[in-house]
Each structure stands twice: as C-alpha cells, then as structure tokens.
Amino acid sequence: MGIHPADRTNTPEKAAAYFKNPVSAGPMMVKTFQPGTDLFVAVANPNYWAKPVVKELRVVTIPDANSRLAAFQNGSVDYVMELPLASATTKFDKTKFRVAAAKDSGTFMIAFNMGPLQPYPALKDARVRQAISLAIDRAQIMRTAFGGLAGPNCGMQYNTSNPYYLCSIPGNGVRDTAAARKLMKAAGYQQGFKVQLDVPNRVLWQDAATIIKANLAVIGIDVTINMVTPDTAISDYINRKNWGMMWFGNNAATPILQLSNWFAPGGVWANNANVPSSLLTQTAQLLNDAGSSKDAATIKDKLAQVEAIAWNLSAFIPVGTRFYLSGSDIGPDLVQGLMPGQLEFVIATRPALATS
C-alpha cells in the first residue's frame, strides 16, 4: 500500500504527472518512468536509513516471450517472467541460470460480464454458463497449453497449499458434454450461438483459448478468439463494460481474499465483471463470517457455502492452477521476487529489514 500526497493526486491530471516521479519513503525511489514506454528505473534512496545492496533496478518491457528468453540467455536481463514453454525443458547452465515453474495462489478462469451491457443474450443465462463449464476439458487445457506444469482446478479457490480447498464443480470438473448439451437445450440454445472470447495476449494463453474454442464447438458454441495486444489493453475492454466472456486469472494471498475478489461487493473481479451487489449479499456475509472466525472447520464450512453459490451463479469458471515460468541469474541475498514470476521485488539492505 502506498501513501501519497492528496493535493498532488486529487485529480486524474495531477495523478498522471505525480506518478512519473512519486515521493518515496522506502529504500528505492523512481529515477525514470514515462507511462507508455518500455523502461522503468528505480535507484537507491540516499535518504533511507538502511542502504539497499542494489544501487539501481531497471525494469524493461519485452512483449514477446521468445525475445524475453533470448535477452535472459545473453545476459541483457537478470530476471525474467512468463517464459515460453520450451524453456521448461531447455538445459541451462545451472551455475548461471535458474529457471522454474512456480504454482501461484491463483486460478485461471473464464469470466462472464454480468452487467446490463452483456452483448450476448445466451451468456445472461446461468444454465449456458454452466454448460460452458461442463464442456471445457480442464485436464487437456492444462496438459497441452501449459505443459502439465500445473494441474486443472475444479473449485474456485487455488488448490496449492490451501487447507480450505474444495472441488465444487459437478463431476469433479471432468468434461461432460452430454450434461452440457442438456443445459443448452433447457436454456433454448440447443442450436448454439456465436461468441467472442477476449484473451490478454500473454504467453501460453492463446493456446489455452484455442483448446476452449474446440471444446465449445462440440456443444454448438462458435467462439471467435480476440487476442488483446498489448495485454494491458484488456483494461479498456473491462472499463467499457460491454465485453462478453474473457480468459484471465484471479490470485490472492489467502483463500478468503481470493473468493472476496469474486464474490464480495467491491471485489476486484466482482467489479470487473459487473456483478450486481444484490447477487453477492449472501456470499459477502459468509466471507465476513469466515474472516472473523479462527475455527478451521467453521471457515471451511463458510467457504464451501460460497462455492455452492458460485456454481449456481457461474459468473466465473475455474479452469486450472495459475503458475509462472520465470528465470533468474541473480545471486542469493540481493534481489528476489516476492512471489515467483511476479513483478514485485524484495531488495536486500544493510542492515537487513525485518520481514515480519
């Protein structure tokens, strides 16, 4: 969380100017930042009481995954995220490079626009959204598009090191096209329909979307894949509020926070998907109850009730465990990602800062 001067950020124009050179009270401060360019530079803050061991941190945008890998291999960059799948089996010099796939506390998903500007009448019907969930082959998506580096997910919560995880989709998330067709017929769409799937253009995500397109064709849904480039432009689609369905991910530090992103008023994805607050009254209360409890059984029960409501609503469809394939040649005790594959860093200082 950052704290910034109110009088310099209280209008969009002031904020745009301020964040090019914001105030820093931490160990690093901004040296170079121009929105829309490919370079961000932070340098050690000479006024900070603990001295960073790294004097300068340069963040460079390299949109193409293969170009990122090449820059990493030739030493142009020291830390890289979202590498191409082939790098998982590339034989690197382990004395110089560390490349690994790390599972995240997150879930790949298909999200549906639940607002009044949803352009596809079929997607306004929960039965159709459930049919889509039943028709996709989660195992195939994670095995083929993501090289089996992470597995399918049949619950809303992340399924890595989570004692509250619950597989809540009927049939344990195994593909069931017969059940999907039955729901499509009940909703009046047995002949299918056409729809656009918006996908931020990130490494491997197009491969996942291609499998989803083939999966849904079996139940008559004709999917056009729209790869949004650059991937940050997906914000424009979200802000216009008139998109239909979208591939993305939702991650958070805890299961309660992750579910709150989807199913609490004001949650990131509740807002992104324009979910009416009236549909979230019960889930918000359950999440509040879970958050205020210290009893593991009570928490698990409350979250299970949220998951049941989540299936009935089916505003979001879980697909698989989110993960990142990243690489580093940085030595120990210097700089490391806060989470694998994330653009958040812990920079060592002398003396060392407390971590808890």
Image: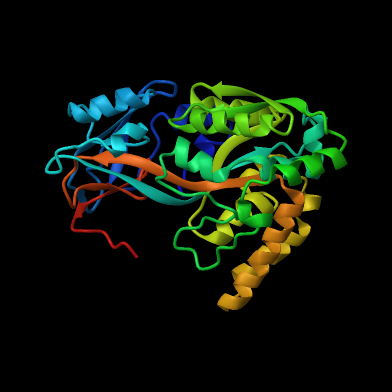
Q: Residue furthest front?
A: 178
Count how many numbered circles sit on residues in the image.
Answer: 0
Q: Nearer the viewer, residue 312 or 285?
A: 312
Q: Nearer the viewer, residue 126 or 288?
A: 126
Q: Is residue 234 above or below residue 275?
A: above
Q: Nearer the viewer, residue 263 or 21?
A: 263
State the image coordinates of residue 163 (x, y, percent, origin top left): 50, 68
User: Position of 61 compared to 228: left or right?
Assistant: left
Q: Residue at x 56, y 44 (%)?
A: 138
Q: Tell me the quarter of the image containing the C terminus.
A: bottom left
State the image coordinates of residue 268 (x, y, percent, origin top left): 61, 45
Q: Determine if residue 83 is in view.
A: no
**Residue 196 in which image quadrant:** top right
Q: Residue at x 44, y 39 (%)?
A: 146
State the image coordinates of residue 244 (x, y, percent, origin top left): 71, 30
Q: Residue at x 37, y 35 (%)?
A: 82
State the image coordinates of residue 230 (x, y, percent, origin top left): 49, 22
Q: Determine if residue 152 is in view.
A: yes
